[in-house]
Structures are given as C-alpha cells and as structure tokens.
Amino acid sequence: MPLRGVIGIVIGTVAGLAALPVVYYLTEAGARALRTAYTSFAPGPAGLGLLAAAAVLAALLRGLSRSAALACGAPLAAVGVLFALRLDLAVELAGRLPRLLAPTGEPPGALAGATGLYALLGLALAASAALPVRPSGRLDSLRRLSRRSATASRAGGRSREPTRTERG
C-alpha cells in the first residue's frame, strides 16, 4: 500500500535515499559480472541476477511511494547523465566512493555509468514517479467482488447486487 501524507513523503524519501547505494552497487556488480561473462565467452547468470535484483528493488521503491522512487531515481539519473556528458569527471568522482567489491583497476560505478545503466534505471524510476497511479482493472474487479461478498455475508447470504426495484 502506498504511503500517503507528509509522513509518507518523508518515509518514502528516506527509504529512497537509503536504497540508493544498494541500487548503485547492485547495478555495478551486475555490469561487471556481465562483462566478465562476455570476455570469457560464458553465460552470465550472476550478472542477470544482480541486475534483476536492482530492478526488483526499484519496483519496490515505486510501490512504496512516488517520493521513494524519485529520491532514488533522480540521483541515479544525474549520475548517468554525468557519465554520458563528462566521463572523465564522473570517473574521478566515482573513484572517491568506497569500494565494496574487489578492486579491479576502475572506480566503483564506472562500468555501469559508462554503459548507461545508471541513466536508464534512474530515468525509469524518476519517470515512474511522475506517472499517475491507476489501479489495474483486475484489482478493481477483485475489490468489488470482495466488497460484494462482505456485504452478502452481513446481509444474510445475499451475494448479488440489489436491482433497481429492490433498492427502491
């Protein structure tokens, strides 16, 4: 259930900012695993799994609230744009980040940034925060059905909607 109100916005923003390093490093680890698989001409299920984990985390953020998606997506998109426009500056700034993986000679985030993964994921998150929330048709019909059955159980077993003549 999405968070609402001012408290929901604050909680969503904090959750999005807390998830930012996780998404950043998951995306980088996935990109490195795919590059390793590519250079060794072998399958890369680890890279696919890591990128899928980053995508799932992004989907969970969007499900939490728009502010969570925006708080995580906007900085990722900015990093992606920085890598696209000023690669030298972006690599220098990425070199100042802590290394969570084994050193490979390149700063953390350089591969995912240079390949556009940060821009793609960040822009997708930011765009999803801008889209209006529409419940799907299936969810609406399930909600109506559950309301009908709850009403029917309270009304003594009547499970259909009353007709116009019955309503009066």
Image (cartoon, rainbow, N blue to C red):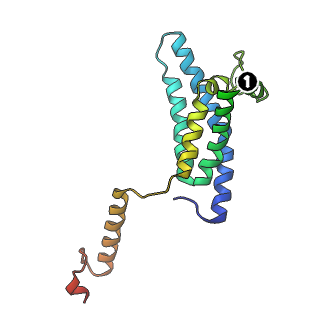
- In the image, taking residue 35 as reference, residue 107 lies left or right, namely right
- In the image, taking residue 9 as reference, residue 56 lies left or right, namely left
Q: In the figure, residue 99 lies in which quadrant? A: top right
- In the image, taking residue 124 as reference, residue 12 lies left or right, namely right
Q: How far across and down, in percent of the image, does residue 146 sit?
A: 34, 67
Up/down of 149 relative to 94, above or below: below
Q: How far across and down, in percent of the image, does residue 84 sit?
A: 64, 28
- In the image, taking residue 90 as reference, residue 116 lies left or right, namely left
Q: Residues within 10 Å of mark 1 (few under 14, many from 20)?
A: many
Q: In the figure, residue 121 lies in which quadrant? A: top right
Q: In the figure, residue 87 lies in which quadrant? A: top right
> Three-letter amino acid code at disc 1?
Val
Up/down of 150 relative to 20, above or below: below
Up/down of 108 relative to 123, above or below: above
Nearer-the-camera pick, 54 or 129 = 129
Q: Residue at x 70, y 25 (%)?
A: 108
- Residue closest to the far top: 40
Q: Residue at x 34, y 67 (%)?
A: 144
Read off the residue under disc 1. 91
- Residue closest to the far front: 85
What element does badge 1 sit on? Answer: helix
Up/down of 144 relative to 165, above or below: above
Nearer-the-camera pick, 48 or 74 = 74
Q: Residue at x 55, y 30 (%)?
A: 50
Q: Residue at x 68, y 58 (%)?
A: 10
